[in-house]
Image: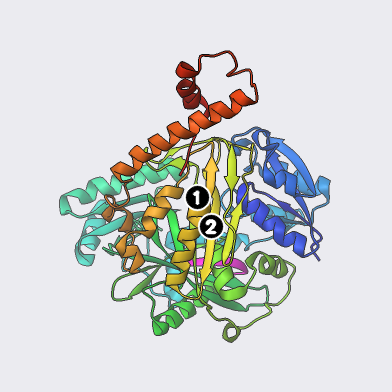
Amino acid sequence: MIKKVLVANRGEIAVRVMRSCREMGIETVAVYSEVDRKAMHVRYADDAYLIGPAPSAESYLRIDKIIEVAKKSGADAIHPGYGFLSENAAFSERCEKEGIIFIGPSAHAIRTMGDKITARKNMIAAGVPVVPGTTEAIRDLKTAVEIIKEIGLPVMIKASAGGGGKGMRLVKREEDIVGAISGAKSEAKAAFGDDAVYIEKYISSPHHIEFQVLGDKHGHVVHLFERECSVQRRHQKVVEETPSPIMRHDVRMEMGAAAVAAAKAVNYHGAGTIEFIVDDELNYYFLEMNTRLQVEHPITERVVGVDLVKEQINIANGFELPFVQEDLNQNGHAIEVRIYAEDPDNNFMPSPGIIKHITEPLGLGVRHDGYAYEGYEIPIYYDPMISKLIVWGKDRKEAIARLKRALYAYKITGIKTSIPYLVRILDVPAFIDGRYNTHFIEENQELLKPLKHCTDRCQDVAAITAFIDYLTKLEQRQPAVVGKDLANNWKDFGRKRAVLRL
Ligand code: MV4
């Protein structure tokens, strides 16, 4: 039985994992880098160990250091969270070798699904629909051109070692084939040390719909329905919801069965996600499997009523799943938005810095998974996602209204965040109607820009708050303002100190 879990991660997901551990009476161990001494996961854990300097290659990615801490601290299991070492087959293998339980899938499952060509072959053998295309790596250009003519343009050239949009090329014209293949190959070689690429027919206006699965170590696999993740910007998800507004009951059941078959094909145990690409006619094709807990897992938790981290730990313990497929249902509607420390009105530039003030939204149907607190400095070294807001409603309409209410109540000052941008998404007709695909962000760029009169008004309000801030400090006789000429000083002071986010 797992008694002590080392969480090999940081940020909101480390805290999220530790919360479930605490409820289960399991002790927690944090690891942290030099810039994370004051991070929330370090404070929340029962025990914490410094593992190295800020760059993740020298800290959160150091398998040797993390194993060493697990042993020193007496942790019997490691939860990798998402990102970092979560899909590293060698790490899963090393944990098992050291007698530490890896709370995640086997090295075999990670490896098979990590190599996209191998994954495609396995899915075809398991009867899971894949995008029409090749099942072997492209060997020579001549055969590649023949195959592409057979499939028909446009096609996608994808790196076998890639995934999540890395090492992908769209080819629309015959004369671009050779350049795209050699370009994709050298890009893949440089990024992954593996230049194997394959060809898929291009699905032109797809939806990204993924299925959550859970498998135990006794061969039982269930799915926990879908998540619609088509609102993405540069392969970064921005909004996720469940159920998908375009899904039909019969297709959902078919896709769920395909997701279960996909997981079974690699003897999957743990929590995983099967990504499908879906066209307007609801034809669906396997894209890839993510062999980890995902950022957007809370919407499934809310609608299906399952604590996925708790299930991961129970599975790692060797327990059988406590439910069968027929026990699981979708109840109501959940939406998640990701809050990034970046400036949506300045090309999404990262906006690290000190959180001056934070008020998280509360109330019926609202969940906030974050890690920032007042006085905490968001480091530049890691992913700029600072929190996730998850809402539930009895239906989609209620969930959207609740999300809007919660976003209006969410105040963060000191850094810029994507909150105003998220509010604008909720006002786009295509989103409100649930008629959107992966082109949503690019197709609605104009609607997603701030209104001119709004930016002007923000400037006015910023000036007023700067002045109030100045007067408050004057009243408190703070040295920075005392003895300075009020008429000339406050604006300058305000520019330096007051940061306002609406
Ligand atoms: C595709 C595609 C169209 N046709 N494959 C992007 C991320 C990676 N998981 C696969 N991706 C795509 N693969 C074929 N054959 C379009 C995309 C794609 C996309 C997919 C899901 C969500 C957002 C996307 C944005 C651009 C392209």
Residue type at the position of mark 2: Leu
Residue at the disc numbered 1: 339
Residue shown at 72% from the left, 69% from the top: 314
Ligand 1: which quarter?
Answer: bottom left
Q: Looking at the rendering, in which quadrant would you find the C terminus?
A: top left
Magenta segment range? 266-274
Q: Does 358 lie within the magenta span?
A: no
At which x and y percent is residue 225? 50, 75
Task: Give the tally of numbered discs.
Answer: 2
The residue where tag 2 is placed is: 389
| CB atoms of marks 2 and 1 within 8 Å | yes
Residue 164 visible in the shown view: no
Q: Nearer the viewer, residue 97 or 362?
A: 362
**What is the x, y in percent for residue 165?**
39, 53
Question: In the rendered image of this protein, does residue 71 appear above or below residue 135?
Answer: above
Residue at the (62%, 63%) spot, across then down: 105
**The N terminus lies in which quarter of the figure?**
bottom right
In the shown orientation, is residue 457 left or right of residue 241?
left
Q: Amino acid at mark 1?
A: Ile
Mark 1 lies on a secondary structure that is: strand
Q: Is residue 213 left or right of residue 311?
A: left
Task: Using a 10 Å C-alpha cutoff, classify the residue at mark 2 as few (fewer than 14 neighbours), some (14 to 19) or many (20 or more).
Answer: many
Note whether 178 is above or below 322 in the view shown: above
